[in-house]
Image (cartoon, helix red, strand yellow):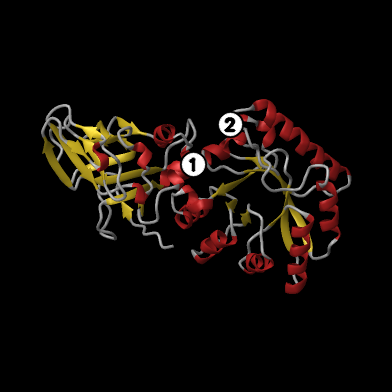
Amino acid sequence: MAILAAEVTPSAPPRRRFFRPTWAEVDRGALIRNLRRIRARLKPGVKVMFVVKANAYGHGAPECARAAEAARAADWLGVSSVEEGIALRDAGVRLPVLILGSLYPFESVLAAVAYGLTPIVASLESARRVAEAAERLKRRLDVHVKVDTGMGRIGVRPEAAPELVRRLSASRSVRVQGLYTHLARADEDAAFTARQLKAFRRVVAELAREGLRPPIVHAANSAGALRFPAARFDLVRPGLAAYGLWPGFEPALSLKSKIVFLKTLPKGATVSYGGAWRARRVSRVATLPIGYGDGYPRALSNRARVVVGGRRCPVVGRVTMDQTMVDVTGVPSARVGDDATLIGRQGRAEVPASELARLCGTIPYETVTALSPRVPRVWAAP
């Protein structure tokens, strides 16, 4: 999946690497500042794993990873699959990469090792597969053991985790480099998070008594790292905060388009499929070349706002696959070719990703991750 990238200044359109005037602009400077702001909250020695799975939450994984590596703003990278890790290696990224997802089938373990990626072990079966891969390749493999303390997704139960680490540690072909868990409610439920951390600390303590504590223990996502200092351990795994989708951090992504058509509609005229919007007055309506095929959800029909001419203007009619209509009656100066900001800031007006997420009944993660590959990712100069 090729993602186009180019250098732009924040106020200028991208260089002509694409022709449809719709793009996602990513601010490299904001991304690096967010990562450094996270690191500033950590004790010396605590490392940062920048989570770049799902194409860096829609921001462009190779570019984000290279930017973080060049700025020395991250120590590790986190991905969800072997394919995502391979894409980073093919892009020249050399930072350690942890595959946060469970590996299956056996060939995926061999591929991970071939590309210098670190797999996780979440069960006795996965431990066996990793050991077999190490023996076949005649090399020692580093792994991280995943403990399920309440997420209910993947991971060994806390009571079984010490025995799994013991078995792996007894192997001459596998080294348990890390031990980790995932916090399921760190952004909303302090009591549940405390129970998760308590269960995890018991596992860490038991292994420490036996001299088997791995060198890297980690638990905290963005919410965990920022709200629960005790969850930071040896490494934190920010995603939401790194991309500026957490309060107090700078949004790194703006979604932009341009007006490609303007029409004046009489009172009573309808717009888009089903005539779901009817003009209550003579109205100027702008058409933008972006729709749900680009990841701008149909659920935003007649609900969202788009910034044109520094003013928030309503989306009117149903969002279609390739086009969205906006009422720009309140912006008399609006012309074909003018910028429209669907996510981000223009002048003093802003439409944050969190606003679109709320309108769709979802979370900012999904809003930015859902942006389609046909939307070019363009890098703003720092």
**Residue 25 — which label?**
none
Q: Nearer the viewer, residue 18 or 330?
A: 330
Q: Nearer the viewer, residue 262 or 74?
A: 262
Residue 309, percent from left and from top: 21, 35
Q: Amino acid at mark 2?
A: Asp
Quadrant where the N terminus is found in the figure: bottom left
Query: What secondary structure is found at the residue carrying circle 2?
Result: loop
Q: Within the image, what quadrant is residue 184 found in?
A: top right
Q: Residue furthest front?
A: 274
Residue 93 visible in the current orientation: no
Q: Within the image, what quadrant is residue 265 found in?
A: top left
**Residue at coordinates 57% horizontally, 37% vertically from top-left?**
40
**Residue 365 — which label?**
1
Residue 196 visible in the current orientation: yes
Which of marks 1 and 2 precedes in the sequence?
2
Above/below status of 83 relative to 215: below
Count of marks placed on residues: 2
Q: Nearer the viewer, residue 329 or 308?
A: 329
User: Callout 1: few (<14), some (14-19), or many (20+) C-alpha neighbours within 10 Å?
Assistant: some
Real-space Cα separation, disc 2 to disc 1, in angstroms:
13 Å
Residue 344, percent from left and from top: 35, 38
Q: Residue furthest right?
A: 210
Q: Is 230 on the left or on the right of 269, as rendered? A: right
Q: Within the image, what quadrant is residue 127 found in?
A: bottom right
Query: What secondary structure is found at the residue carrying circle 1?
Result: helix
Q: Nearer the viewer, residue 280 or 78?
A: 280
Q: Is 170 on the left or on the right of 277, as rendered? A: right
Q: Amino acid at mark 1?
A: Tyr
Q: Mark 2 — residue? A: 187
Above/below status of 340 relative to 79: above
Above/below status of 329 relative to 32: above
